[in-house]
Image: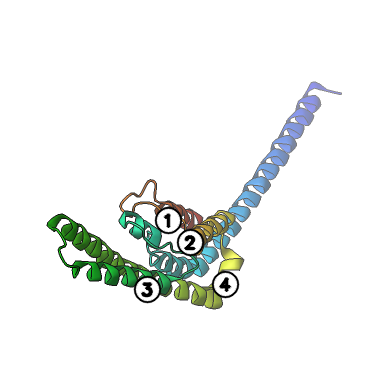
């Protein structure tokens, strides 16, 4: 076989190899581009379906009060204990205590120090009554809106919500149950680091933002 023929065969083989490699690389690039486009379409569809759902959910969880009635009662001596959504029972007990203290004010020969202490006790209970009434109204509104959310948006949430969002929502529900059903303290309303409702709500919102790629 002549040298020219050998050179031609080597050249043809090299060309064929380059062609095969080029076709293979182009195929991988096209497959990657196709997968990327599909992923982007899925993400866009997810955003379109979840954007309004997440906005609605955030507006609802923000309606929940950030303290429990027991947090409000913490500075009231001999206060009733709240649990199981029994707001009215707590308010009635506070009313009885206020009436009892008012009766003590009418006692004969009451000294100034005792009178001052009674007035402080009454003031604390009146303040607690107002705050607990506000807490009750906020909680009931949020609770009812959350129930309506599940009746109207459950399908979209179940189809598109990411696993982290689902986990964080379960955590938030547990916190709300512990605070407003079991009667545990949530922590100081003005403490975003240690208040368990603030922390759980923030974690849930951040997970929704991450799920939408925001």
Where does the image place residue 130, in percent across and percent down from the top left? 28, 69
Residue 39 image point, x, y percent: 58, 56
Image disc number at residue 86: none
Marked residue nearer the N-terminal end (4 or 1): 4
User: Where does label 2 land, which residue?
Assistant: 176
User: Label 3 vs label 2: CA separation?
Assistant: 24 Å
Left/right placement of residue 152 relative to residue 34 reads left
Q: Are marks 3 and 1 in contact (CB under 8 Å)?
A: no
Q: CA distance from mark 2 to mark 4?
A: 19 Å
**Left or right for 159, reference 178:** right
In the picture, the disc for residue 92 is 3
Q: Earlier in the sequence, mark 2 or mark 4?
A: 4
Front-most of residues 71 and 94 = 94
Q: Of marks 2 and 1, which one's residue comes earlier in the chain?
A: 2
Real-space Cα distance between discs 3 and 1? 27 Å
Residue found at the far right of this picture: 1
Labels 2, 4: front one:
2
Instruction: Check if mark 3's residue and mark 4's residue have beta carbons within 8 Å.
Output: no
Q: Residue at x 80, y 27 (%)?
A: 5
Tell me which label, 3 or 4, sits earlier in the chain. 3
Q: Which residue is mark 4?
A: 154
């Amino acid at each position: 076989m002549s040298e020219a023929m050998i050179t031609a065969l080597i050249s043809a083989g090299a060309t064929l190899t380059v062609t095969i490699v080029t076709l293979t690389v182009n195929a991988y690039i096209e497959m990657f581009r196709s997968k990327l486009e599909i992923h982007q379409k899925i993400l866009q569809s997810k955003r379109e379906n979840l954007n309004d759902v997440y906005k609605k959910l955030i507006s609802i969880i923000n309606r929940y009060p950030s303290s429990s009635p027991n947090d409000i009662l913490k500075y009231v001596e001999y206060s009733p204990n709240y649990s199981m959504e029994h707001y009215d029972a707590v308010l009635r007990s506070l009313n009885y205590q206020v009436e009892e203290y008012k009766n003590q004010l009418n006692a004969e020969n009451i000294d100034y120090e005792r009178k001052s202490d009674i007035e402080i006790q009454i003031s604390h209970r009146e303040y607690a009554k107002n705050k607990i009434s506000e807490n009750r109204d906020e909680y009931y509104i949020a609770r009812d809106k959350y129930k309506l959310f599940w009746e109207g948006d459950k399908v979209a949430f179940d189809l598109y919500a990411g696993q982290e969002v689902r986990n964080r929502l379960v955590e938030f529900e547990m916190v709300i149950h512990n605070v407003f059903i079991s009667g545990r303290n949530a922590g100081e309303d003005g403490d975003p680091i240690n208040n368990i409702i603030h922390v759980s709500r923030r974690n849930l919102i951040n997970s929704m933002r991450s799920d939408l790629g925001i």
